[in-house]
Amino acid sequence: MSEGSGESGAAAAPGPHWERRLPRKDLAAVHDVRAGLRALLARWGAPGRADTAELLVSELVTNALVHTDGGAVVTARLTGGPAAPVKGRLRVEVRDFLSRHPTVRAPATGPPGRNGERGMDTAATSGRGLLLVHTLADGWGVRSHGVGKSVWFELDAREP
């Protein structure tokens, strides 16, 4: 994970974008977010890239709605100007209003450590979202705001 804007030194040409405000604890909105992102990415990227983006945005939105008391704002933007649908980079940010930064839980491996600590419980039904983001995104991180934070990820139209 890296912190900060996650943007390279050169400014990328803006492209299509989409934004949605979500009410607090409205988990039904996760479906609407996926649908909005799917519409934005209808002609973007190599096969499977939009599916990966949908999975990752689902994880970040669910985290924001479950682990905070406020709503969230989701922003998705393609960069690369006119070539964005073919060669562009997707950046998705999920902003919430809790300043505590999330942590990636390590997968469970081997027996518990000296203090009984280990990675996530293999029988757990949650806790893998940020591990998925860390594994599948081309870049991701957390950016602090005056109130709250944005957790973001980026995907290239083509796999690196």
Image (cartoon, rainbow, N blue to C red):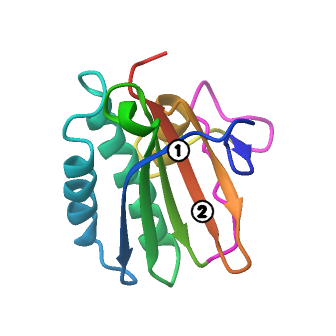
Q: Amino acid at mark 2?
A: Ser
Residue at 39%, 62% (x, y): give it. Answer: 62
Residue 30: give x, y in percent of width and height.
28, 64
**Amino acid at dot 1:** Phe
Is 83 a magenta residue? no
Q: Is residue 100 magenta?
A: yes
> Furthest residue to the right?
114
Q: Nearer the viewer, residue 36 or 81?
A: 81
Which residue does the image show at 41% across and 54% down from the upper left?
A: 76
> Looking at the image, which residue sits at the far front?
82
Residue interval drawn in magenta:
98-115
User: How far separated are the C-alphas under marks 1 and 2?
Assistant: 10 Å
Looking at the image, the residue that sits furthest to the top is: 160
Residue denoted by label 1: 153
Q: Which mark is residue 150?
A: 2
Q: Is residue 157 above or below residue 126?
A: above
Left or right: 121 as drawn, with respect to 43? right
Towards the viewer: 114 or 32: 32
| Residue 109 falls in image quadrant | top right
Query: Residue 40 in the image: x percent, y percent?
Result: 26, 49
Q: Residue at x 56, y 36 (%)?
A: 134
Q: Are marks 1 and 2 in contact (CB under 8 Å)?
A: no
In the displayed structure, does residue 1 sit left or right of residue 26? Answer: right
Prevailing secondary structure of the magenta residues: loop
- Quarter of the image where one finds residue 21: bottom left
User: Where residue 47 sits: x, y (%)?
Assistant: 23, 22
Q: Which label belongs to residue 127?
A: none
Mark 2 nearby-residue class (10 Å; few <14, some 14–19, many ≥20): many
Measuring from the top left, give residue 87's x and y in whole percent. Answer: 40, 25
Given residues 157 and 50, the one toward you in this image is 157
Vertical arrangement, residue 32 with respect to residue 114, above or below: below
